[in-house]
Image (cartoon, helix red, strand yellow):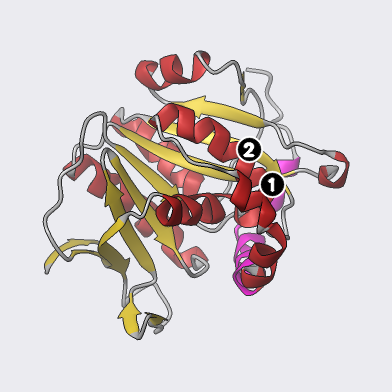
């Protein structure tokens, strides 16, 4: 096992792996509606991706071990196939860990020479019950990312706030001139939202040139809501401490 340490965050690689080009890191971190978590987990399952590593932190994460198939796993796990690396968190991110973890993710992506970091994000909207198909918006920090998204005929996220680890990743990528593609889906803020995950996956799969049948995700929507309700509750409490409600507001300045 090979370990890489970033300010109290430990990336563990169980084996050496190589990504095809253009390489993409998809982050599946708990957020509003668990949009990114559900989307990333579904991709790992459908693509039968290989687990190659994980992330832990004795300084910032609670003392937990997640058991899968009788084997202990770290709170965040890494999977790879082709040109895609997926990072999934199976526990809510403590507010104290947001900055060091987010910066460590960007550090790791830079070390691995990842071409694009993709952030599938849920943005809580008050009228979500009235929305049959959630819309998806985008933010890109590079010209290359913009070109990928402009071809898909979806709207840019023009005004608003982003709160939590995805916001830190975005700011850090801007600072370092790294490509970060943020896909924001309208979602329930406090309830798991598989439909929003489907909407974001429709765009993400085109960006990453992945072919995945999304129908089973909608068919299992109720099962997913039940399985993820505890993670959603822990995430809701964590997001409240991060002032996630800011995303309902618009910035004061026009430009």
- Residue at image coords 44%, 31%: 181
The crowding category of the residue bearing disc 2, from other C-alpha atoms within 10 Å (few below 14, some 14 to 19, many at least 20), is many
Q: Which mark is residue 22?
A: none
Residue depicted at x 15% and y 44%: 18
For the C terminus, the image quarter is top right
SS type, badge 1: helix
Q: Is residue 115 above or below residue 186?
A: above
Task: Name the one closer to the observer, 29 or 204.
Answer: 204
In this rendering, the answer to whether 44 lies above or below 96 is above
> Which secondary structure type mostly characterizes the magenta part of the structure?
helix
Left or right: where 149 falls relative to 233: left
Give 168 or 23, whichever is nearer the viewer: 23
Q: Dividing the image into 4 quarters, which one contains the N terminus?
A: bottom left
Residue at which label 2 appears: 199
Q: Which residues are magenta?
A: 230-248
Is disc 2 placed on a helix, strand or loop?
helix
Location of residue 127 (image quadrant): top right
Please identify the quarter of the rendering in which residue 137 is found: top right
Q: Is residue 145 left or right of residue 35?
A: left
Q: Position of residue 140 (x, y in %)?
A: 46, 25
Q: To which residue does mark 1 refer?
A: 195
Residue under the image location 40 percent in, 44 percent down: 26
Could you tell me residue 105's position as x and y percent?
A: 32, 51
Whether the residues at callouts 1 and 2 have beta carbons within 8 Å, the answer is yes
- The front one of 151 and 214 is 214
Image coords of residue 56 (percent x, y): 31, 70
């Amino acid at each position: 096992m090979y370990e890489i340490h970033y300010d109290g965050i430990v990336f563990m690689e169980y084996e050496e792996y190589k990504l095809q080009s253009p390489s993409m890191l998809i982050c599946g971190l708990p957020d509003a509606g668990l949009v990114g978590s559900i989307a990333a987990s579904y991709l790992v399952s459908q693509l039968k991706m290989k687990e190659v590593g994980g992330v832990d932190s004795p300084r910032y994460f609670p003392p937990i071990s997640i058991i899968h198939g009788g084997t202990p796993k770290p709170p965040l796990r890494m999977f790879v196939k082709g040109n895609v690396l997926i990072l999934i968190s199976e526990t809510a991110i403590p507010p104290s860990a947001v900055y060091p973890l987010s910066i460590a993710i960007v550090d790791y992506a830079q070390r691995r020479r990842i071409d694009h970091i993709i952030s599938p994000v849920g943005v809580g909207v008050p009228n979500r019950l009235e929305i049959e198909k959630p819309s998806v918006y985008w933010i890109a920090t590079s010209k290359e990312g913009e070109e990928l998204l402009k071809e898909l005929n979806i709207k840019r996220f023009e005004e608003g706030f982003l709160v939590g680890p995805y916001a830190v990743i975005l700011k850090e990528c801007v600072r370092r001139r790294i490509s970060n593609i943020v896909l924001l889906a309208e979602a329930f803020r406090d309830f798991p939202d598989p439909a929003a995950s489907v909407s974001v996956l429709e765009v993400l799969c085109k960006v990453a040139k992945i072919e995945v049948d999304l129908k089973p995700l909608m068919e299992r929507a109720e099962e997913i809501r039940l399985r993820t309700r505890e993670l959603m509750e822990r995430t809701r409490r964590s997001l409240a401490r991060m002032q996630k409600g800011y995303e309902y507001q618009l910035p004061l300045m026009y430009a």
